[in-house]
Structures are given as C-alpha cells and as structure tokens.
Amino acid sequence: MMYGDQNVQGPFTLDAAKGGTRRGLRTVLGVAHHVAGVTRLLDVLPLIEGDPRIHVAYTVPPNSIFTGGTDRFLDDLGAHVIPWKQAILSRFDLAVTAGQGLLQQLHAPIMSLSHGAGPNVFAHRWDGPGLSAALSVNSTVTQSLVCHGRVVPSAIMLGHEEHRAGLAQVCPDALPAAVVAGDPCFDRITASIGQRTRYRQALGVDPEHRLVVVTSTWGMTSTLGSLPAGFLTRLAAELPREAYRIVGVIHPNFWTWHGRRQVRSWHAECERAGVLLLPPEEGWRAALVAADALIGDHGSVTCYGAALGVPTLLASFPAERVVPGSVLECLGGLAPRLGLDRDLASQLDSAMREWSPDGSELLRGRLTSVPGQSAEIIRAEMYRLIGLAEPTLPAETRVVPRPVPFRDVIA
C-alpha cells in the first residue's frame, strides 16, 4: 500500500481527543527509510510499544533509493503508518530511526541508530559527471548530523566506545549526543543460542547435517555481485544432500531493487537443487545461530556470524571499501578466502576444522563494548527523551523468531 498524501488519523493529530480511548498518550515515530531500517527498529521499538502510555506510529521518508517494499513490510506487521507529508507537520515526543536523510524536517527529539554492525564500510561512490570526492563512512553516526547549525539527532547510539573517535573526527559538535549502547541485533542473536535446535528443525536440518549459510550484501562487490550467477547451484551440486543443507541470505536492498518475483526467479534453479532462500525481512539471524559454516562478504551478516563463532569463508572482500581499524577489517584478517578454482566441500571442511574461537571472541569484543546490555541502555534513553519514568520490569532481550524459508519454487 502506498500512503500518498491522504492523512491518517490518530493520537498525534489535532483531532486526537475525538477518537481516543486513552488520555495523555505520548507519541513516538519510527522513521523507516528502508526495509533494513525497519528490521533494526523492530529490535528497539518493542521495548516501549507495550507501554499503555505510549502510541507508536511509523513513516517512510521518500529519500532512499531502497524505499520500495517498506510500506508493504509495515502493513504486514500491522503497524500504524502515516504518510511522510503528515509526519513532518505533526509533533512527536520521540522519533527513532536507523537510516539517514530528511530527519531535520521532523518535529521531535531524534534517536539515531545504525542498521548494521557499526561504521565499517565507506559509502558507495555514485556514477556521474561530477568530480570524485572523499567518501564518508556509511553509517548514521557520520551522515546527516548537522543542519543549519544544529545537530539533528538528540541521541546517537553507538555500538562501541571506540566509535566515539570516528564521530569526533566527523562531527565533534555531536559528541555530547553520543550514547554507547551496544548492538541490539547482536545481543538478540547471542540471546537466541539456546534455540539452535529449534531453528535447525525449522530449516529441515537433521543432527547429522552440516548447515552452510551463504550470505550476500548488495552491490557489485558483494557475494552475488562478484561470483558467477550459478554459484549456489554449483555449491548444491558439490555438497552431498545426505551431509549438507544450504540456506541463502540476501540483503534486503537486493530484493527491493530487483523485486521479489525477479529474485526468486533468478534463484529458482538453486532452490530446485535444494537451497533454501530466506525472506529479506527476517530469518537470517536464526540461520546464523543454526549454522555450521558461513560463506559471505563484507556485509554485517558475515560479521555477525563470524563473531558468533561460525567458521567463515569470504567469497568477496573489497578491502578498499572497508574502514581501517574497524571490526570488518579485523574479520578480513581472520577469515580465509573462498577459491572458485578449488573443491568447495574441502574448503568448507578446512574452515570448520581450523576456525579459531579466539578470532570470534576478538570480533565480539569489537562489535559491542556493553554485551547483553543494549536493550537496557536504549530503553532508558528512549524514556529519558520521551520524558516518562521507565517501567519497573527490566528491559527484555528477546530471542529472534523461528526462520520461515520460502518453500515452493516460483512458477
């Protein structure tokens, strides 16, 4: 559904009292620039959505090239969605975002989060007639921070204490808004380790099977962008079905850019060969918990999997795009490269034998400096900005949902 210019009624409008059942509601706006941003909002907004004093609505700014499908995702969640043109003419007690752009138009204190594993890669350089310029770090903590002499976010949530240095370099004026809050996504992944058997069963993985997850971020330097189109089909052919299962995890931007039917059509052959594809919205985190090995690239999913302890092979790793000193650069020094000219099964076997738990521990220490505390810190900051007392019950780090792969090959 596209919301266009038609206003949506609710407790954030001038007519709030006419249809309301609760008095004095505080209003919070989830700002969803793209599907990947929604997934991060779903890590944090449930921390306050159950509070009867708070109403949470969502909106989709029109500035991202990957906005497509975001409205539908929010509709499927049953979210209260309002058009952007209405959102920027309304007041909210808080806005929460995991994306960049147009935030200065909102009338609310803004909490900004990263939608990935931190400030690890440089932004893509777009083609065009203009001169090349230095690339910024592709993260909410380094873009769109200042407008007309004012820092836009009221709270900039950082995953690690080390990230303060990057923020200080880009925008020292924003440092007072920085809060070291850890990584809510990785906290949920680690909290879900006890669900491994349940997740494997949902993926049809028996105890004797090894589960190989193949993940790709988006862009020409990703797994899908750099490997031959038939790689997943080849992998399925080389890994015997009686010993292996394969799951494909593809970045939401790839699905948005090409459309769900096209992506499914491109992968119909490998699905017929036994590869399971996961929807872009959810399931990949459970797959990482269930995995025995991982083939990936410079995307956050690969970083999370390796930090979790999954033996990892890098199918693609464009070092020029990786921020020096980042956790992703650390991953590049730890994980072996996949060789297409060699037997794939033997490379996976070697990775599973030789992967060092010490390497995963090193990555975990670079992802978050407050492991397991993200929900507590982020909830406290949201209530501070809203101006309400926190509930007495502790903030809960929820396990991730059971994976639901596509089951039928597209006709």
Image: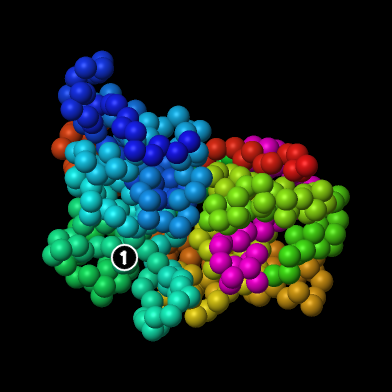
Dot 1 alpha-carbon crowd within 10 angstroms: few under 14, some 14 to 19, many 20 or more: some
Query: Of residues 98 and 81, which is closer to you in this image?
Result: 81
Q: What stretch is highlighted in magenta?
A: 197-226
Query: Of residues 278 and 332, which is closer to you in this image?
Result: 278
274, above or below 82, in the image: below
Q: Quadrant of the C terminus?
A: top right
222, above or below 319, in the image: above
Residue 18, image quadrant: top left
Q: Which residue is drawn at 32% across and 57% down?
A: 101
Q: Which residue is drawn at 38% across and 51% down?
A: 62
Residue 216: within the magenta?
Answer: yes
Q: What x and y, as percent, mark residue 45?
A: 35, 39
Q: In this view, does 82 lie to the left or right of 401?
A: left
Residue type, label 1: Gln
Is residue 295 in view from this perspective? yes
Residue 74, image quadrant: top left
Residue 219: within the magenta?
Answer: yes
Q: What x and y, as percent, mark residue 336?
A: 64, 74
Q: What x and y, as percent, mark residue 378?
A: 30, 46
Report the residue marked by disc 1: 143
136, above or below 266, in the image: below
Q: Which residue is drawn at 15% across and 63% down?
A: 148
Query: Of residues 2 and 367, which is closer to you in this image?
Result: 2
Q: What x and y, as percent, mark residue 338?
A: 70, 73
Is residue 370 in view from this perspective? no
